[in-house]
Image: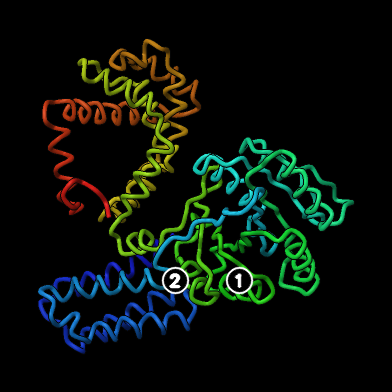
Amino acid sequence: MFDSLTERLGKTLSSLSGKARLTEENIQETLREVRVALLEADVALPVVRQFVDRVRLRAVGQEVAASLSPGQAFVKIVNDELVKIMGEESHDLDLSTRPPAIILLAGLQGVGKTTTAAKLAYFLKQREKKSVMVASADVYRPAAIDQLRTLAQQAEVAFFDSDPSQRPVDIARAAVSEAGKQFADVLILDTAGRLAVDDDMMQEIQVLHETVKPIETLFVVDALTGQDAANTAQAFNEVLPLTGVVLTKTDGDSRGGAALSVRVITGKPIKFMAVGEGIDALEAFYPDRIASRILGMGDMLSLIEEAEQKIDKKKADRLARKMKKGGKFDLEDFRDQIQQMNNMGGIGSMMEKLPGMGQVAKAAQQQIEANPFGQMEAIINSMTPKERRFPDSINGSRKRRIAGGSGTQIQDVNRLLKQHKQMQKMMKKLNKKGAMANMMRGMNANLQMPPGGRFR
């Protein structure tokens, strides 16, 4: 998300960041470029006007004029205002009620409510250690109930079985009762959507809301719909007391207009965003981190949190011990690293969270697409255990056999072996005394971390 906005704003602000002095003329020119960039990102026009006016007001005042580096001060103003537009701080779910805490999901058809229900259940189970039940009151869409049942099994959470012949309000009442009997901490109720906002849908969901009295009513919206997402959210907000918004399909949206518009137009915080198709692809929404990503400053906190959640610590420790004892980084180790990176969304996803690496991430992603992780893993799996441990033993005839077994070409095998060699050299360098400490010191300097190495 935000790729096009990041690229456009990056070019615009870089031309200004090195200026020793800001004038009315160069500020106006930059603001025009910022305005165009936001409109092209499908940000709602009232939001664009508000944003540009705020930046202009601060930029022409003493705040920039008194700064030792006015260009950098201007970039900071843009960052601050982006954070304000998206809500300034993250908003956790309010689950402080007598169990089960009920979360009602609302939204149009096709935005991903059912998958969001399962992802949110998995998030609460893994991150908050809550016992969760999910239920579907969607009796209109074919197989909606079966879909949620399957997803609940993937998330390993309780599922309340319902039937299309039942009334949605009866399903909701029964689900609340069953969640109480099973001592569930949270009940997530999926509701029916329509292709467009209509009176029947609104009336039905109002009745559901009055019946179950949820502590959280989340509006689920497709990020790809841009500023229409904010307008639809406003329509729902007029008939339901929404407590927050969930943005879906953000991995397919390069513009980001929805994220920058929803908060301003509805006044409701964005609480989560779906960043992929996997059951674990749901992230809490942090305005300051998103603003940092938009301006190409990275998002180290999210990267660290993701690593803590998704990296197999046992495998990482085993590799560290092996390297410390002077062992070689073989193809089995390489396969483990591929799997770890894949779990974190791939090398492109990781690199875009590193400061100043946005454009590098694109190049890395393009390179990986030529030899994707799945293909690389298939090639290694087609080798014998001995070949994985001793890659130098792989000659021409072995390469032909491996290529045939993995459904790839010999050049793909050669490319993987070359990448392994490069990784092996890097691991050897890192293993030399003091190399890791020097690298960490360099990272700290680049990130300008405060004393003690703590992020703020």
Classify 310 as above or below 45: above
Classify 31 as above or below 318: below
The answer to whether residue 254 is visible is yes
Q: Which residue sits at x=24%, y=15%? A: 327
Residue 264: x percent and y percent? 48, 76
Residue 146: x percent and y percent? 76, 43
The answer to whether residue 366 is visible is no
Task: Give the amino acid type for the residue marked by disc 2 in the picture.
Answer: Ala
Classify 216 as above or below 12: above
* 103 relative position to 203: left or right: left
- What kind of element bears circle 1? helix
Q: Which residue is mark 1?
A: 233
Residue 22: x percent and y percent? 16, 82
Pointers 1 and 2 in contact (C-beta within 8 Å): no
Q: Which residue sits at x=75%, y=40%? A: 181
> Around disc 1, counting alpha carbons within 10 Å, would you say few (fewer than 14), some (14 to 19), or many (20 or more)?
many
Q: Which residue sits at x=69%, y=38%? A: 158
* 222 relative position to 355: left or right: right
* 183 relative position to 325: left or right: right
Q: Nearer the viewer, residue 92 or 260?
A: 92
Task: Give the amino acid type for the residue marked by disc 1 in the picture.
Answer: Ala
* 200 relative position to 32: left or right: right
Indicate the quadrant where residue 369 lies.
Answer: top left
> Which of the numbered marks, if any, corresponds to residue 41?
2
